[in-house]
Amino acid sequence: MTGFGQVAVVGAGWAGLACAAELAAAEIPVTVFEASRQLGGRARSVELDGRTLDNGQHLLVGAYVETLRLMRLVGAAPDALLLRMPLRLDYPGAFRLALPRLPAPWHLAAGLLAADGASLREKLSAAAFMQRLKASGFRLDRDTTVAAWLDRHRQHGAIRRFLWEPLCLAALNTPPQHASAQVFANVLRDSLGGPRDATDLLVQRADLGRVFPEQAGRYLGERGGRIRCAHRIREIERSGNGWRVAGEHFEHVVLAVAPQHVPSLLVSRPAHEPLLRLLADYDYEPIGTAYLAYPEPVRLPFPMLGLRGPLGQWVFDRSAQGGPAGLLAFVLSADGDWEKLDDEELATSLHAELTATVGPLPPPHWQRSIRERRATFRCRPDLPRPGPATAERGLWLAGDYTCGEYPATLEGAVRSGVAAARAVLAGK
Ligand SMILES: Cc1cc2nc3c(=O)[nH]c(=O)nc-3n(C[C@H](O)[C@H](O)[C@H](O)COP(=O)(O)OP(=O)(O)OC[C@H]3O[C@@H](n4cnc5c(N)ncnc54)[C@H](O)[C@@H]3O)c2cc1C
């Protein structure tokens, strides 16, 4: 596109890469600055003792339509890179919900009615709850916590314990007693309340870097974009009608960094004080991923199983994700007792939780844990969320926290990046 100045994107997480890819598709010259040596931010591949793993076990769902579109745009084929399965929540011996391949909403109604481990009364109450939500357009009169909202709708018993609460924790990474009911309702609208394939689980078949970031980087390179890794931006300055970043002039700058990294970039610019005040009020939640390697014959009956705790929520069979046979990934969401344990204690406890669920197993011969202390912002009721526009012309925001409808997820990050790219294009 002629006459359109360069755009700088600061941060090569999924938001920054989605933004850059969308701009590159519109033939806008774009430069991405990334502080670390690799792409992907909070959803990236890591090397652990010679194994290529992820900084955290991730799960995508069929409702991630923008993520899937961006993957296709950059040439990362979702069918090859993601294993698509109808939703199945399996807590062996306690609860099982599997959605059949029927058109919406019958898949949900039939799945709920056939669930094992819940009374008929609970199932009918859950179906009626979804109906009421649909009738209200998934809009709450006023936001509250998920726990209070479930109480108000008399959602108790096994469906609350094994469906609503784990979904809330998995999607919002915020415990139900602190989580925003409106954001959870938005998630339900686009997943269980959406078309049948929106409820599908999409389990990676490769490490996270290969699912999107690496291919996005290649796509940018092919379209004349530049990626500067190991390049932390310390300040951005006004320069004529545009901006100076790392000694270069840009017409637009998109800050695609996590919310806790915004203040250091804007602190010297008084116009952004209200934004910085808003972000100063954010809290964060951790996520831990414990990898345990078992002797090869160990396989889970399904690629993802629910754990009844008290520490772990889910365990994933990495052999279904292109990993070695016998490697399992345990997910530990949000603040909890797991943080007090060292890696070895954690592995011992998770092994015990798994054997309590699936029966006796040989002990793991290798374990490593990765703890992301600020994995996501805490998705509280009425949390103020900025959009892509800022107080200064040509300076934009992207990042999961700017996608107001969604919690901190890959889909929220990608949507925020696309929204910022469209704002740049419209604001040219
Ligand atoms: C362990 C874990 C598990 C998760 N599980 C799931 C899941 O199952 N499903 C799901 O949908 N989501 C999940 N999430 C959330 C999801 O990963 C995030 O919402 C998403 O990756 C955020 O992307 P982002 O681009 O907004 O931010 P980030 O990924 O934080 O990207 C920001 C980038 O900016 C860079 N940066 C910061 N400051 C500067 C600077 N000054 N100069 C240059 N670069 C800078 C950073 O290095 C980083 O690469 C999980 C997150 C974690 C941590």
Image (cartoon, rainbow, N blue to C red):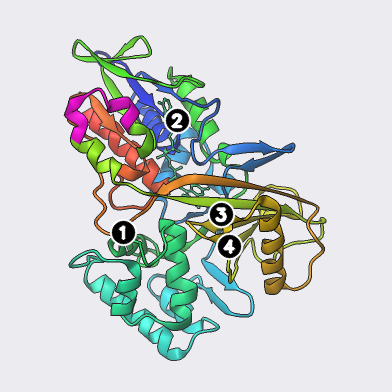
- Say whether disc 4 or disc 2 marks the residue closer to the N-terminus: 2
Q: CA distance from mark 2 to mark 1?
A: 25 Å
Three-letter residue code for mark 4: Trp
- Marks 2 and 3 close (CB-CB < 8 Å): no
Q: In the structure shown, which secondary structural element does the residue marked by tag 2 occupy?
A: loop
For the stretch drawn in magenta, the main secondary structure is: helix
Mark-to-mark CA distance, 4 and 3: 16 Å
- Look at the numbered disc 2 and say if its residue's Cβ is closer than 8 Å to ligand 1: yes
Q: Position of residue 192 (x, y in %)?
A: 39, 67
Q: CA–CA distance between discs 1 and 4?
A: 22 Å
Q: Residue at x 37, y 47 (%)?
A: 412
Which residue was labeled with disc 4? 314
Q: Quadrant of ligand 1?
A: top left
Q: For this view, does 340 lie left or right of residue 65?
A: right
- Taking depth in this image into account, of 127 and 341 the one nearest to the observer is 341
Q: CA distance from mark 1 to mark 3?
A: 26 Å
Instruction: Say which amino acid is labelled 3.
Output: Glu
Q: Secondary structure at mark 3?
A: helix
Distance of mark 4 from mark 2, alpha carbons?
A: 28 Å
What residue would you read off at disc 3? 339
In the image, what residue type sits under mark 2?
A: Ala
Q: Which residue is mark 2?
A: 12
Q: Is residue 272 magenta?
A: yes
Query: Residue 205, how many percent across, how many down?
Result: 62, 48
What amino acid type is highlighted by mark number 1?
Val
- Residue at 28 percent across and 27 percent down: it is 266
Residue 314 lies in magenta, yes or no? no
Which segment is the magenta one? 263-273
State yes or no: discs 4 and 3 in contact (Cβ < 8 Å): no
Ligand 1 lies under 8 Å from the Cβ of mark 4: no
Does any portion of residue 386 appear in the rendered image? no
Label 1 CB less than 8 angstroms from ligand 1: no
